[in-house]
Image: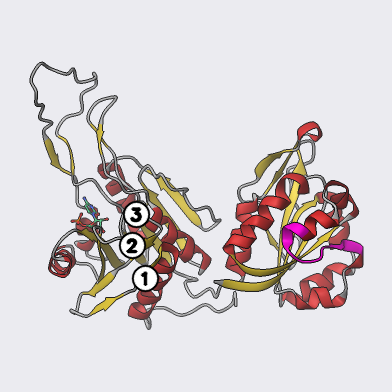
Amino acid sequence: MLTGKLLLVIDGPAVLAHTPTLLSGLRSAGRFRVTVAATRSAEMFLPLLALSALSGAPAKAYSELTEDDLRQADVILLAPVSEHFLAELTSSDAWARLTDNGRRHVLVAPARLEAESDETMVPDGALLLSEDNAVLALGAMGAVAVASPEACVEAVCTALTPQDFAGQTVLLTAGPTIEDADPARFVSNRSTGRMGAALAKVAARRGAKVIFVHGPMSWPTPQAPTIRAIAVRSAEEMCNAVLAEVPKATIAILCAAVADYMPVAYSHEKIKKGTDATFALLLKRTPDILATVGALEKKPFLVGFAAETQNLTDNATAKLRKKNCDMLCANDITEPGCGFAVPTNRLTILFADGRREDLPLLAKEEVAARVLDIVKREISGQWTMDVSGL
Ligand code: C5P
């Protein structure tokens, strides 16, 4: 669980739509102590009492911030702040005290009214959060573009996480694939993409660039400036995307539940039901993406997944060898709390040299963190750790 002290500076009418979601997102993302400092214009929309209730600590007027408040904060987040406030702040002495020679993380999410210029200034010594520029509707006041509360929460988490995957590019596959039979029917499976999404989120937080090739997910695709999502539908599309991206990757973790079979032929017309009681759809094998990557002459550190229902170790060991993985994460999907559409997983990790490691039943994000710890350990010595973000 992430911990840290956060000073949240808020300004302007955008607080109405942004701040409650941001504070509730921070509450579920970690154990943060949040002090909210509201400018006069923020206070007009959300009084200090409401801000105290939402943050769980006494909120302050921005004008009453003390040197102590600044000194104690591990992260200072200015979100949302109007461009006018930001321009005044960055041209004053207060800015130097806030950024404190870059020792502290200062994250800034300017809120831009529709009528304002779209050239956002990049303040010295701060990280600008504008990646997703979510549009917030403010009723009669119009709309503002600002980094979404989710993007702000993610940026805080990243700022408080050691960047031990900086310099790595992680290629991930996730979710199911869908193999169309006709305009109405398809062959697929019950994967939601949640394990892959957790891996993408944790890897990005730890400083990796993530290429996230995913089938149609029923779990939200993780958002972060360093996650590049590539949406595909079928196994063939996923295979093409992976082969195009894999030369950039230093690590590939292929955890998609790729459909093993696809219809031999796609019918452009909806297949009519006949009078027979049975119907056979002829299927053929899809490309095995993991095995294809495993057979590449120059392959990244390769991690596969295996969902088994019997003889877990034997089946998974055979897969590891056949697909030439460096590491294979196996789980028994019949075990309670494991597999599809559940928040937890219990993995047995097998290595190419015959070693084996059993992880306990953990939340999928925790599983993702442990898998990445193990990947890091296995390839340590092959990379140099970038500690500049610490
Ligand atoms: O053979 P099996 O499907 O059990 O292997 C599972 C592993 O292989 C997973 O890592 C999965 O992402 C990968 N896989 C693949 N392409 C396929 C089938 C599985 O990449 N067509």
- Tell me if residue 129 can be seen: no
CB of residue at label 3: within 8 Å of ligand 1?
yes
Answer few, some or many: residues within 10 Å of disc 3's Cα (few below 14, many 20 plus, some between 14 and 19): many
Per the image, label 3 sits on a secondary structure element best described as strand
Checking the image for residue 253, the label placed there is: 2
Report the span colored magenta. Answer: 53-63
Q: Amino acid at mark 2?
A: Ile
What residue sits 83% from the left and 73% below the top?
97
Q: Label 2 vs label 3: CA separation?
A: 7 Å
Which quadrant of the structure image shows residue 65?
bottom right
Q: Earlier in the sequence, mark 2 or mark 3?
A: 3
Checking the image for residue 173, the label placed there is: 3
Q: Is residue 113 on the magenta stretch?
A: no
User: Horizontally, is 252 left or right of 65 in the view?
Assistant: left
| In the depicted structure, whether residue 23 falls above or below residue 381 | above
Place of residue 306 in the rendered image (x, y in percent of width and height, measured from the top left): 23, 61
User: Horizontally, is 173 left or right of 261 in the view?
Assistant: right
| In the depicted structure, whether residue 209 falls above or below residue 50 | below
Residue bearing mark 1: 371
Q: Label 2 vs label 1: CA separation?
A: 10 Å
Asked if the residue at tag 1 contacts the one at tag 2, i.e. Cβ–Cβ closer than 8 Å, the answer is: yes
